[in-house]
Image: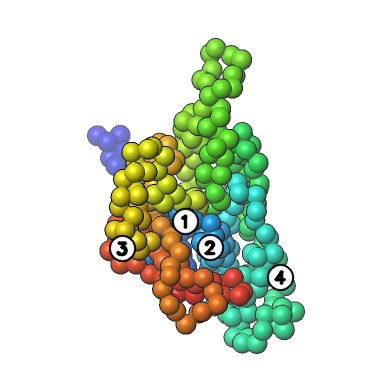
Amino acid sequence: MTSAFSWIKADETAAQALVRILTERPFLVLPAPLHRLPLRVGNVVEVVGPSPSAKTLILIQAAINCILPKEWKGVHYGGLERAVMFIDLDCRFDVSSLSRALQRRIIEANGLRSSLKGNVNEIDKELFAACMGRFLYTRCYNSFEFLATLKTLHHRLQQEKEKRGSAVYMLLIDSIGAFYWMDRALPSSSTGNNNRKSLSLQTVVETVVHEIQRLMAVHPILVLATKSAAFGDKQSTTEVIRKRSDEKMLASRGPQNTSHRDFMPSVWQSFVSHRLLLRTSDGISKHQNHPTFSTEWLLPSLKSSEHFTVDDDGVLVTI
């Protein structure tokens, strides 16, 4: 009987449990267009869109919300003060774009309304350096480097947790389909070992998903991944003929109704918990000199859609 009571004895109170959970898994307010759904750690969010459609900029804005502190020297920034891990598979990331966007957020929070160039020397250099230090970056040039990064990421995240006293909150991948065509050529290659699986697009993606799942089991993180979109590009002759016969109907419906085709293997598709689709929009807005994009949540499906544009400073503006 004594052992039974000791087994059901509480290790912590409800208040202590809530403090622990909120510390380990805090809630981050994400910028538009990711703000429509309550995304938390454990979610795998895919941002799909043509190039360009501000996919990388969306990742940058989400990263800034994470690396900024909630408050600094009496100024409210509304951030999480947590580190992010950015894996660049597209190999086109420009750190200066992150720097400019972060400087702009700091300037706006301090109520400085003049131009960014005029106020860049007025920002808190200590705050800026601390935020940039929370942005962890690595670049991969093929799937083998990507897999090697994922397999060693647990050790790096553990080091960051011990160093900073808080865990990395987000894993950002830009873009998950970057090596699709190179991986499709893998079946013709040989591993030279009959005891190992033959390399192919399917096995590579399966390993990627497996490694991210292992990582998420140990480190509570939110995964945001961008992916290029394919809209109605059919390959078979029958589908091409059907596409031509329906050309007038598709033209009358407009580009917003063009079907979205997912080219990634099913193992990745089933791994994704949320999917946001971006499209170029032909709608007229007050931002005549800037491209306009529309958003649509495919997973889970939301009936409402939003529009946004990107201004000269690389900031998403909801319209």
The 10 Å Cα crowd at callout 1, few under 14, some 14 to 19, many 20 or more, is many
Give the mark, 1 or 4, whose residue is nearer the N terminus: 1
> Which residue is at 71% across, 70% downward?
126
Q: Are marks 3 and 4 in contact (CB under 8 Å)?
A: no
Labelled pair 1, 2 in contact (Cβ < 8 Å): yes
Does dot 3 land on a helix, a strand or a loop?
helix
Q: Earlier in the sequence, mark 3 or mark 1?
A: 1
Q: Which residue is mark 4?
A: 126
Closer to the camera in the image, 73 or 217:
217
Q: CA gap, disc 3 to disc 4? A: 52 Å
Q: Which mark is residue 89?
A: none
The 10 Å Cα crowd at callout 2, few under 14, some 14 to 19, many 20 or more, is: many
Mark closer to the chain start, 1 or 2: 1
Residue beneath disc 3: 253
Residue 74's x, y, as percent?
59, 80
Mark 2, secondary structure of its residue: loop
Residue type at numbered disc 2:
Ala
Q: Using the rendered image of the protein, determine whether residue 164 is visible from the camera's viewpoint.
A: yes
Q: Earlier in the sequence, mark 4 or mark 2?
A: 2
From the image, tell me which residue sits under label 2.
54
Q: Amino acid at mark 3?
A: Arg
Q: Which mark is in front, 4 or 2? A: 2
